[in-house]
Image (cartoon, coloured by chain):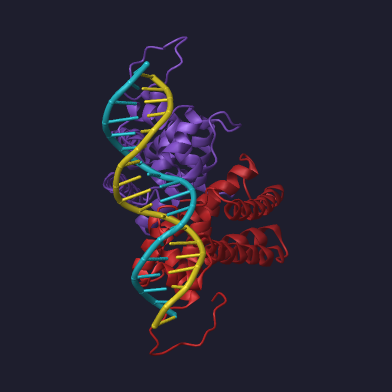
Chain colours: A red, B purple, C cyan, D yellow
Amino acid sequence: MTTSTRTARRGRPGHDRADVIRAGVELFNEQGYDATSVSDLTGRLGLTKSALYHHVESKEQILQIALEDALGGLEKALEDALQQPTAGSRLTAIIEGAVRVLTERQPQVTLLLRLRGNSEIETAALARRRRFDHTVTGLVREAQSEGIVRTDLDAGVATRLIFGMINSVVEWYRPDGPVDPDLLAGEILAVALGGLRPRA
Amino acid sequence: MTTSTRTARRGRPGHDRADVIRAGVELFNEQGYDATSVSDLTGRLGLTKSALYHHVESKEQILQIALEDALGGLEKALEDALQQPTAGSRLTAIIEGAVRVLTERQPQVTLLLRLRGNSEIETAALARRRRFDHTVTGLVREAQSEGIVRTDLDAGVATRLIFGMINSVVEWYRPDGPVDPDLLAGEILAVALGGLRPRA
DNA sequence: GTCTATAAATGGATAGAC
DNA sequence: GTCTATCCATTTATAGAC
């Protein structure tokens, strides 16, 4: 998925970088990045700190790689959505696309959404996220001027509410759970555009 | 608001417990609870660690007091909503009530929503929050069976989506910002029930 | 690829004087 | 109510052997 050599080392006991990153992201999501020590991580993996530092340069590098994965996915989804011909289809595409990225890369996106900006890496990621949000707000504003979205609501507020709904998915969605991701994308689109009230 | 003696000590330079808690909650929200050291907090307040520990027993006590404030407010709002006579008015009341608590106690609720369960205090607060969510899900299910809410959606998923939208308010709402809290409650209710699409 | 051992700094918290 | 000084556990990270 990320960069490591994809030769499945059968029978070999050793870990590789991908293992470390996977476990790290998992643990960061369970406990929070700052509450997770490198010892916690080595404990889960069953190796020592020195062995871990043989695979990654720092604890923060694990975060950085995950954030790149999350932001890359979201930016790609936005790029694709912008190819759509109409304001309505662009809006629909970015909502569906964002839900898809959120479910497919749930652990990485979760980290992104919980950032506080406590380091240069975090502030850089937050800046990219703001750029994404800003472009999406443009799509919503565009949809408003075409009469597709209600205008009694500021475009920024509308975007934040919709993405509040979308982003909250990372807090409860589980890939092996009962909720189908494709179905979920449709449900979120329906609730975002039509609300909870039954169709008239 | 919390417990401290409310005699405004004019002219006196010293801090009191309320100051410490206010500054602590503020800093926890900026940096995250775990990323915030007691030194960070004393630095902001302009006193030493010993002086700070004269006002509070521990770093975690600050968190605990804030969480009690947040949960108390939400539970009170739910209790009030349950007094309403119809399923529709109960659902409306808890949505409006939750938005009101979120805007009035934004810092405290923000802490609650970011908990990971890293201590007994955190897991206890998360249990209370789950109890709240569960009761609200009951209200949504009730509204579904009365035809007020669409039934092509699991009640749990619907609740999570709506509260995802509501809860996201803590991430951007500022009491001194341009968004009026009462207006916001109405907008969220309108989008939650009717969606982004303009009224037909 | 993993280990033992350790460095150097920072974490939360306390003792006791003023 | 605040201070200086300090304790001790834990933190991220490194050196160097196997």
Q: Is residue A174 left or right of residue A103?
A: left
> Of all residues shown, which one is farthest toward the top?
B11
Q: Looking at the image, is A145 positioned above or below residue B176? A: below
Q: Looking at the image, is B17 positioned above or below residue A14? A: above
| Residue sitting at x 34%, y 33% | B69
Where is residue B179 drawn, in percent x and y?
A: 58, 33
The quarter of the displayed image where residue A49 is located:
bottom left
Q: Quadrant of the N terminus of chain B?
A: top left
Q: In terms of depth relative to the viewer, which is nearer, A159 or D5?
A: D5
Where is residue A63 drawn, in percent x and y?
A: 52, 61
The quarter of the displayed image where residue B48 is located:
top left
The quarter of the displayed image where residue C5 is located:
bottom left
Where is residue B98 drawn, in percent x and y?
A: 40, 38
Where is residue A175 drawn, in percent x and y?
A: 41, 69
Q: In terms of depth relative to the viewer, which is nearer, A84 or A72?
A: A72
Q: Is residue A90 something that shows in the picture?
A: yes
| Residue sitting at x 57%, y 76% | A3
Q: Looking at the image, is A132 positioned above or below residue B63? A: below
Q: Looking at the image, is D14 positioned above or below residue A136? A: below
| Residue sitting at x 37%, y 72% | A47
Q: Is residue B199 something that shows in the picture?
A: no
Q: In terms of depth relative to the viewer, which is nearer, B7 or D14?
A: D14
> Of all residues shown, which one is farthest toward the bottom?
A11
